Image: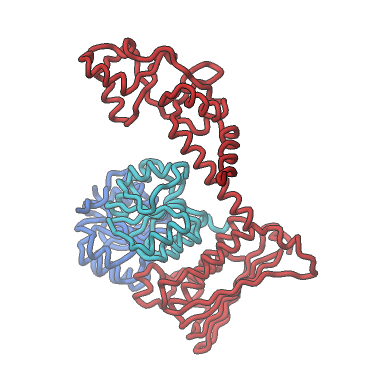
């Protein structure tokens, strides 16, 4: 799924300026606990979260997540956006809830991360 | 939609509470303060938190039930409290993104935010 | 001229890039029997200034916003596209170098050229001057990026050094209780490993484990340090703090066990997954802790080429 499709599905606003339209988002994950995100076996391409602090971006960075979407209209502060830009992470915000966002993306065909194939 | 049907279709493991009740919509969050502020009555709540406070939150907000994701088991005291308060706790091996997706496909949507 | 060099680079790119690389492929077309009055919707909605006219897959003309305006002035809105379009059109082939397009734009002064596939002469795209500029800028950007990476990539560093044993050491200091700075050490290490040219999987595992350890230092201690040793076989990362130490190490390793205070939990950590995560992503983990003294965590990630040996 292309970033632009996700932007449309989530009625999102882009906070990090222009993004590369060719980036493919393949796997979705959602959590408000960053250790949970880090525990997923494969890199997820999009993280949906209700948590808005700088550690979300650090988590995305170390776990190779390309797109972070903050839900429920929460606006992250400047520091967060700047760190994301510095690390080539795209940041969206949506007014939708986590539930509605995950539901829409899944229904549109975005695959889920899997928690249990870690030990392969 | 009735919680009984959700349990059946998604193959959830019921560990507490009476599951014969209606679900209005879904809410997914791992931050208790967020659930207290934004979940609505009869929501089904998806979370990976397992400590006893989740029962209090579900009770307070009159939620329809709690789904614990990623194969998480509730703490003993959580389970005891949930039985006391008749709060359904349901378990799944799936991660949040996927279980929410499946609920959504069954017609359970998120609350609308204004 | 002082911009001689860039001019040369751009000229080079106009030969290197094909029209196919920069043209717009998602094209709008109209039929020749469409009334001019309907043209407005097509042009305005898509915000384009001209559109190719196609009948049965065959390009028969091109009609532009100027044609539309002329019809409006002369009150000929009922005319058909075929009566007002330009019929004798210049086209380009998708496999031609960009420089051909540049020359044609210079020669004819048109705003756009339809692009055909050489094989079946079907319309496959349309090219405007701004497509050319965008295409060249994008290419320049990626050339720049590649070069920058090449400059930093030091993957052969170990091959170039003549010694019996060689390792690189990187040291990072971590401030306790300062959540704003938490993550700086591990993201710094990640960047460094990337520049060393290690594989993405190795980098990800090292970065995640170090990050969890760094969060632990920030959340529970008054500070500490992270030291990474990299040799041709493995990455060894040592994480040391000054206390308070872990009373029951075995318990701390159980998934879900946590002593995290509320402020740590509200920041998205402290769910008892840090140490289990570190264990999961590393090949070896050794944890020693003395209450009131401090904790010493050592992790090893083997480099893929050597993973199957010992």
Q: Is residue B37 left or right of residue B8?
A: left
Single out the residue that lies furthest toward the bottom.
C292
Is residue C70 at all visible to an observer of this figure?
yes
Q: Residue at x 46, y 20 (%)?
A: C123
Q: Colour of chain A?
A: cyan
How far across and how far down the image is residue C35, in percent? 27, 14
In the image, is residue C290 above or below residue C102?
below
- Within the image, what quadrant is residue C161 found in? bottom right
Q: Residue at x 37, y 41 (%)?
A: A108
Q: Residue at x 49, y 81 (%)?
A: C223
How far across and how far down the image is residue A81, in percent? 38, 59
Q: Colour of chain B?
A: blue
Q: Is residue B24 left or right of residue C201?
A: left
Single out the residue that lies furthest toward the top.
C83
In the image, is residue C37 above or below residue C216?
above
How far across and how far down the image is residue C2, in percent? 56, 46
Chain letter, red = C
Single out the residue that lies furthest toward the front.
C1
Q: Nearer the viewer, residue C227 or C140?
A: C140
Q: Is residue C291 left or right of residue C299?
A: left
In the image, is residue C79 above or below residue A106?
above
Is residue A113 at all visible to an observer of this figure?
no
Q: Residue at x 60, y 62 (%)?
A: C193
How far across and how far down the image is residue C205, in percent? 56, 62
Please name the colour scheme applied to the rendered image.
by chain
Q: How many marks?
A: 0
């Amino acid at each position: 799924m292309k970033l632009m499709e996700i932007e449309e599905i989530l009625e999102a606003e882009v906070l990090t300026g222009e993004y590369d339209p060719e980036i493919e988002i393949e796997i979705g994950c959602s959590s408000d606990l960053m250790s949970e995100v880090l525990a997923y076996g494969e890199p997820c391409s999009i993280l949906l979260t209700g948590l808005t602090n700088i550690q979300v971006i650090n988590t995305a960075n170390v776990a190779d997540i390309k797109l972070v979407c903050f839900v429920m209209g929460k606006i992250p502060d400047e520091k967060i956006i700047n760190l994301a830009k510095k690390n080539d992470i795209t940041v969206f915000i949506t007014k939708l809830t986590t539930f509605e966002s995950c539901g829409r993306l899944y229904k549109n065909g975005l695959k889920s991360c899997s928690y249990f194939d870690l030990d392969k | 939609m009735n919680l009984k049907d959700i349990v059946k279709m998604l193959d959830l493991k019921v560990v507490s509470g009476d599951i014969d009740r209606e679900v209005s919509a879904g809410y997914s969050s791992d931050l208790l303060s967020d659930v207290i502020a934004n979940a609505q009555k009869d929501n089904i709540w998806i979370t990976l938190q397992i400590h006893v406070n989740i029962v209090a939150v579900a009770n307070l907000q009159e939620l329809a039930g709690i789904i614990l994701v990623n194969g998480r088991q509730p703490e003993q005291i959580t389970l005891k409290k949930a039985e006391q308060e008749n709060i359904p706790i349901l378990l799944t091996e799936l991660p949040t993104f996927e279980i929410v997706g499946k609920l959504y496909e069954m017609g359970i949507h998120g609350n609308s935010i204004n | 001229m002082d911009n001689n060099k860039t001019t040369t680079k751009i000229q080079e790119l106009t030969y290197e890039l094909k029209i196919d690389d920069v043209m717009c492929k998602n094209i709008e077309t109209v039929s020749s029997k469409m009334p001019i009055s309907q043209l407005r919707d097509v042009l305005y909605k898509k915000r384009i200034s001209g559109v190719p006219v196609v009948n049965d897959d065959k390009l028969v003309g091109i009609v532009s916003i100027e044609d539309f305006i002329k019809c409006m002035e002369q009150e000929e809105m009922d005319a058909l596209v075929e009566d007002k379009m330009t019929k004798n059109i210049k086209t380009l082939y998708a496999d031609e170098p960009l420089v051909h397009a540049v020359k044609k734009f210079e020669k004819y002064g048109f705003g756009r050229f339809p692009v055909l596939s050489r094989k079946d002469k079907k319309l496959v795209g349309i090219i405007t001057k701004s497509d050319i500029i965008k295409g060249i800028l994008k290419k320049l950007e990626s050339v720049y990026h590649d070069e920058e990476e090449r400059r930093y990539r030091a993957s052969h560093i170990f091959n170039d050094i003549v010694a019996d044993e060689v390792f690189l050491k990187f040291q990072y200091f971590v401030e306790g209780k300062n959540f704003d700075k938490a993550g700086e050490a591990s993201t710094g290490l990640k960047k460094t490993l990337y520049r060393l040219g290690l594989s993405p999987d190795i980098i990800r595992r090292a970065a995640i484990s170090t990050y969890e350890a760094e969060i632990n230092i920030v959340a529970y201690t008054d500070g500490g340090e992270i030291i990474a040793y990299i040799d041709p076989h493995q990455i060894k990362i040592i994480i040391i703090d000054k206390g308070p130490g872990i009373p029951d190490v075995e318990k701390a390793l159980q998934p879900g066990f946590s002593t995290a205070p509320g402020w740590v939990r509200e920041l998205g950590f402290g769910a008892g997954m840090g140490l289990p995560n570190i264990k999961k992503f590393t090949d070896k983990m050794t944890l020693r802790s003395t209450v009131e003294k401090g904790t010493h965590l050592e992790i090893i990630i083997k480099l893929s080429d050597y993973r199957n040996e010992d």
